[in-house]
Amino acid sequence: MAAEEINKPPSLPPYPEMILSAIEALNEASGCNKTSISKYIESKYGDLPAGHTALLSHHLNRMKDTGELVFWKNNYMKPDPNAPPRRGRGRPPKPKDPLSPGSDLPPARPRGRPPKDPNAPPKPAKPKAATGGSGKPRGRPRKMARPTGGITTGTATTTSAAPMAAGSGRPRGRPPKVKAATMTEVSVQN
């Protein structure tokens, strides 16, 4: 046990005390940033633990959350009791109207859509709206059936173009590759 006490570095004060003493000693009007506080603590107390920067950040955040320090423009300072509270960015909150002590507050509405009333009468069905007025049915028109035989009263160009467009006996898509006819023997004259 005696060996442990001898090798032990001199005990450091708690981090909050070291931070407050650093801010008081530096005494800057706009407060002190984290690096200046860290440098002051290192110069004054010398041998610091290995995780000094992590410990310092943790304690600074904790002191900021509890209200022991004020964080403003990346600087830490002691809160001034007479100063008005500083607000951050954005729109300030609306001032709340003070209610008289005798008035009752209405119950707060729950979030979301209210549940349906089971006792409410059913709503009447809406009549379907009339068509757009054009008289045509919606969507793509049906494919016309190809006339078979009968009297045709068109020119030759319309009849020749119609089978290709409407769908003649040939299948859709690229035609199959034509196989070359078998080679016939050609007699060679010598």
Image: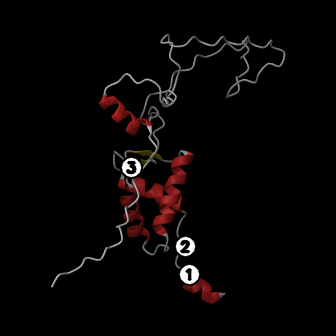
Q: Which residue is mark 1?
A: 8
Q: Nearer the viewer, residue 19 or 106?
A: 106
- What's the residue type where badge 1 is placed? Lys
Residue found at the far right of this picture: 119
Q: Is residue 66 above or below residue 182?
A: above
Numbered mark located on residue 11 in the image:
2
Residue 190 image point, x, y percent: 15, 85
Q: Is residue 126 left or right of residue 151?
A: right
Residue 56 image point, x, y percent: 48, 62
Q: Cβ–Cβ below 8 Å for labels 1 and 3?
A: no
Residue 7 image point, x, y percent: 55, 85
Q: Is residue 169 left or right of residue 109?
A: left
Numbered mark located on residue 75 in the image:
3
Image-quadrant location for residue 83: top left
Secondary structure state at the residue bearing disc 1: loop
Q: Nearer the viewer, mark 1 or mark 3?
A: 3
Q: Cβ–Cβ below 8 Å for labels 2 and 1?
A: yes
Residue at left offset 65%, top offset 15%: 99
Secondary structure state at the residue bearing disc 2: loop
State the CA–CA distance, disc 1 to disc 3: 34 Å
- What's the residue type where badge 2 is placed? Ser
Residue at left offset 37%, top offset 60%: 35
Alpha-carbon neighbours of circle 3 within 10 Å: few (<14), some, or many (≥20)? some
Q: Earlier in the sequence, mark 3 or mark 2?
A: 2
Q: Is residue 111 above or below residue 167?
A: above
Image-quadrant location for residue 43: bottom left
Residue at left offset 52%, top offset 79%: 9
State the CA–CA distance, disc 3 to disc 2: 28 Å
Residue 13 image point, x, y percent: 53, 65
